[in-house]
Image (tube, rainbow, N blue to C red):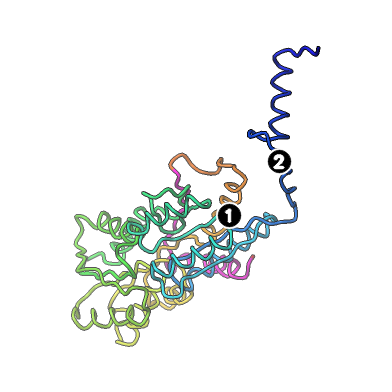
C-alpha cells in the first residue's frame, strides 16, 4: 500500500483537480497564449474637436513604443452622452480589454460607467467621473488649471473689469472645476464674472454666443473660453466685430487657431494642457492594467499631468513642441 505524507497528498490532490476539475470531469486544456496577438484598447473623447488630434498622436506613440497593443481612437460625432455611450457599447461588443473615456456628463453617466467598469478595464481621461468605479483618472487637475487661468485673467486686466465665460457643457466635471478655480483666483479682485454661456459643443453656436455677448455688453473687458474650440470661436467673433485689442481673450488648450491668435495678439493667452501625454499615459496604464499590473495607479487614483500658461513670451518654444507632436515626433 502506497503511503503519502501530507505534502504529497496536497500535491496529488491539486494535480487531480487540474486534470479532472472540481466536479470530477476531464477538462480540456485552455488555448495557448498567442504572443503575436495584441492587446485591444480604446480611447473615447467627449467631442470631435481638433484638440483631440494631439491626444490621438500620444496614443499612437504609446502603441508603437509598447509594440504589444492596438488602440482604437473614437470621437463621438455630436458630442452627446448618448452617442458616447453607443460608441463605448460598440467597443465592448468588439471585446476591447481596456477603455479610456472623457465623460460628457459625469454625474448622469456614472451608473453607466460602473457597468462598463464591470466588463473591462476603465479609466477616465481629460474629464473625470470621480464617483464611478473607474480605476484611475489621467489628466489635468482642472481646479488648479482654473486657478492658473484666473491669475492670467488678473494679469490681463490689471484695472479689473467684467468678463464672460464660454464652454460647451457647464456640467462636465472639467468645466465645473475650471470655473470654480477661476472664481477662487478672482475672489477679492476687481474682476467680475457676468455669467457662463454654453453651446452644447455646437461651434456655430459658440461663435454666436460671443457675438451676442459683445452686443449686449459693449464694455466687456475679457472673454474666457473653457474648452478647446471656444478660444478660436471667441477670436473669430472678436475679429468680425472689430474688437481686437479692445477685449482680452483667455482660452484653454492648444488648437492651432488659439496659438496663432496668441501670436498675432488677438488672444492674450491660453492654459495649455498636455493632451499628447493624456493619450500616451492612458495607453501605457491600460496596457499594464490588462496584465494585472496596478503599480502605475497613484494612491489617489489620479495621474495628474501639469498645465502651462502660454502667452507671446513663451509661444515660439511651445509651438515648436506642438508641431513635433502633431508630426508624431
Q: Is mark 2 on a helix, strand or loop?
A: loop
Q: In which quarter of the image is residue 250?
A: bottom left
Of the pair 93 and 5, the residue shown nearer to us: 5
Label tally: 2
Q: Is residue 322 above or below residue 107?
A: below
Q: Is residue 157 above or below residue 125?
A: below
Q: In which quarter of the image is residue 11?
A: top right
- Image coordinates of residue 141 in percent, x first then y, are 40, 52
Residue 134 drawn in magenta: no
Q: In the visual, does 164 lie left or right of 113? A: left
- Marks 1 and 2, Cα distance to the nearest angstrom? 26 Å
Q: In the visual, does 86 lie left or right of 202? A: right
Quadrant (top left, top right, bottom left, bottom right) of the N terminus? top right
Q: Are marks 1 and 2 in contact (CB under 8 Å)?
A: no
- Image coordinates of residue 325 in percent, x first then y, are 59, 66
- Image coordinates of residue 102 in percent, x first then y, are 44, 61
Residue to which mark 2 is pinned:
27
Q: In the visual, does 34 lie left or right of 218? A: right
Residue to which mark 1 is pinned:
97
Residue beneath the point at 49% across and 75% down? 256
Q: Which of marks 1 and 2 is in front?
A: 2
- Image coordinates of residue 170 in percent, x first then y, are 30, 65
- What stretch of residues is rendered in magenta? 301-328
Amino acid at each position: 500500500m502506497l503511503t503519502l505524507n501530507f505534502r504529497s497528498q496536497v500535491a496529488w490532490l491539486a494535480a487531480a483537480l487540474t486534470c479532472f476539475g472540481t466536479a470530477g470531469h476531464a477538462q480540456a486544456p485552455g488555448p495557448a497564449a498567442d504572443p503575436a496577438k495584441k492587446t485591444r484598447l480604446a480611447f473615447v473623447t467627449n467631442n470631435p474637436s481638433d484638440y483631440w488630434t494631439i491626444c490621438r498622436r500620444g496614443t499612437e506613440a504609446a502603441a508603437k513604443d509598447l509594440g504589444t497593443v492596438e488602440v482604437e481612437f473614437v470621437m463621438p460625432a455630436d458630442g452627446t452622452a448618448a452617442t458616447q455611450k453607443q460608441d463605448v457599447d460598440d467597443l465592448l461588443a468588439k471585446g476591447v480589454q481596456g477603455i479610456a473615456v472623457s465623460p460628457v456628463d459625469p454625474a448622469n453617466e456614472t451608473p453607466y460607467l460602473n457597468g462598463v467598469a464591470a466588463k473591462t478595464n476603465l479609466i477616465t481621461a481629460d474629464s473625470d467621473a470621480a464617483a464611478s468605479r473607474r480605476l484611475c483618472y489621467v489628466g489635468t487637475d482642472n481646479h488648479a488649471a482654473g486657478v492658473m487661468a484666473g491669475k492670467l485673467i488678473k494679469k490681463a486686466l490689471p484695472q479689473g473689469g467684467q468678463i464672460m465665460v464660454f464652454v460647451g457643457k457647464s456640467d462636465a466635471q472639467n468645466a465645473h472645476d475650471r470655473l470654480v478655480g477661476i472664481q477662487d483666483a478672482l475672489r477679492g479682485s476687481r474682476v467680475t464674472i457676468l455669467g457662463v454661456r454654453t453651446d452644447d459643443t455646437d461651434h456655430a453656436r459658440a461663435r454666436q454666443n460671443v457675438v451676442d455677448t459683445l452686443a449686449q455688453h459693449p464694455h466687456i473687458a475679457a472673454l474666457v473660453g473653457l474648452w478647446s474650440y471656444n478660444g478660436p470661436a471667441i477670436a473669430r467673433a472678436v475679429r468680425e466685430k472689430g474688437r481686437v485689442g479692445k477685449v482680452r481673450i483667455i482660452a484653454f488648450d492648444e488648437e492651432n487657431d488659439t496659438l496663432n491668435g496668441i501670436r498675432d495678439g488677438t488672444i492674450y493667452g491660453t492654459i495649455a494642457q498636455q493632451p499628447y501625454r493624456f493619450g500616451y499615459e492612458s495607453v501605457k496604464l491600460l496596457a499594464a492594467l490588462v496584465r494585472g499590473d496596478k503599480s502605475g495607479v497613484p494612491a489617489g487614483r489620479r495621474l495628474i499631468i501639469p498645465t502651462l500658461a502660454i502667452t507671446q513670451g513663451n509661444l515660439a518654444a511651445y509651438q515648436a513642441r506642438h508641431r513635433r507632436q502633431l508630426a508624431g515626433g
